[in-house]
Image (cartoon, rainbow, N blue to C red):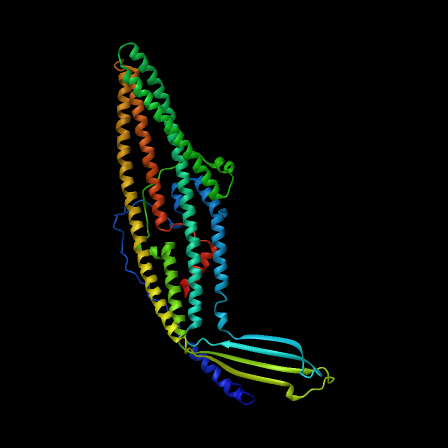
Amino acid sequence: MIFFGGYFRKGAIAIPALILLSGCVGSNRPDLTQKVPDKWDVAMPAWGHLVDLRSWWQTFNDPVLDELVENALANNLNIAQAEQWLKTAQALNGATASSYLPHLRAGVQPVQDAAARDNYLHGSIDMVWELSLYGESANRQQAGEAVVLSAQAREQGVRISVVANVVQNYLRFIYAGRQLSLLSSQEAVEKRLHTLAAIRKTAHIGDAEEQISSSLRMARLQANIIELQQVREQSSRALALLTNKTLTQTVQLLHDKINLTPDIRIKEIPADLLRTRPDIRQAEADVLQSAADVGLAQAALYPRLTLSGSLLYAYNQTENYRRSGSNSIPALGPIIDIPLWDWGMRLANKHAKEHELQAALLGYRKAVQDGVGETEDALSSLNYQNQCLQALHTAFEQQNHLRIMQQKLNQLGLSSEYDGLSGKSTMLQVESELVEAEFKHASAFVTLFKALGGAPLSAVSESFTTHAEGR
């Protein structure tokens, strides 16, 4: 249908009415309220160092570790790639709603009439406006936001993983170095014990079993030393890869000392996981995307209206610039797309999208449950490792007391060098167990803050989060 002349006045009245109608239908945003516990099941101490979720590794008070994490956040290629994907999603999201704005096009082209006598120059201005009458624009905008939220979740997930891996590999490097130092001391003790065992056998004080047992312990020490050297090398290579530095640059920073993890307390509660864990944010994005798909499938069941208009002006070049009023032709009319023969297919698609939405909602609930459960497990593990560490501290103190007694007996001539070295070997074994317990306790600390979603936000993610919370 085409309107000429006076019909423009009626169209000018109808268009605002259609615009008002298009605002009557909004996006489809499901309620994502989830029931989570008010507090953690694992009892947390009311005292201790309060740890910031965005800089939790600084609890170790280690400048080298701080520098490694900063290098990783600034130079890691996985983080840089994820940030670019996030910027891509944000750039595309900004143009999502433009598909439901009027599109104007102007052009000039030469044409010739059918008799090939006159040449014309046609100039035209064309307008196409697809109206969002049933929430299409809002749902497409929601779908675009879901894509951005998904990219944000992936980017933050990469940052969390990189930070945790840097800290974990740093702890492994230091643990291996401390254990190698203890094993080196223990190897020296075992060599002396092996020599004394041979002397005792010759003097008929000991038997061959002592010498064989000493040889067996030395072989085990060698195997442990080789394994720890491999761990140390693997950790240094992993740190070099995570920080995008050369192995030489990374090794120059490393050392074998670390401050023990202090008693800590956290301010995060289970409800905070809904905004800090990337897997929950990803599940939220899936729900928003599915809800937008349902809204678009619902809108596809109804007629689609598009306004089309054009203004054509024909300039006759052959007749030497002669002009006539009949050379300009305006036109305005609607294009109506009515689903008739494929309506059943569209309805089936809507039902399928509704099932996808229900699956996404269940996935969101599962992500929340998994997040709370994983964090509870991490808290429990940290609690048990703390108890184990305290028990080994007590054992170390008792063994140290026995060592002092053995030294006094040796000074009084009531004990032999062989007995003293046996006590020293036991002391080194207990100290090795204590170092391992400290490593496991620190690793449990890392696991906890990885489960909490601990890592600094990038500038891109932070700006989007602020914008989303402000709506």
**Is the residue 203 above or below the residue 373 in the image?**
above
Between 431 and 264, the residue placed more toward the observer is 431
Residue that protrudes farthest toward the bottom in the picture: 6
| Rendering coords of residue 22 (x, y %) | 43, 77
Q: Is residue 324 left or right of residue 202?
A: right
Q: Quadrant of residue 203?
A: top left
Q: Quadrant of residue 285?
A: bottom left
Residue that protrudes farthest toward the top in the picture: 203
Residue 61 seen in the figure: no
| Rendering coords of residue 336 (x, y %) | 47, 80
Residue 205 seen in the figure: yes
- Name which residue lies at 38% across and 43% down: 59
| Rendering coords of residue 406 (x, y %) | 27, 20
**Is the residue 146 above or below the residue 68 in the image?**
below
**Is the residue 294 above or below the residue 17 in the image?**
above
| Rendering coords of residue 265 (x, y %) | 31, 47
Tell me the quarter of the image containing the C terminus: bottom left
**Is the residue 302 above or below the residue 221 in the image?**
below
Between 309 and 90, the residue placed more toward the observer is 309
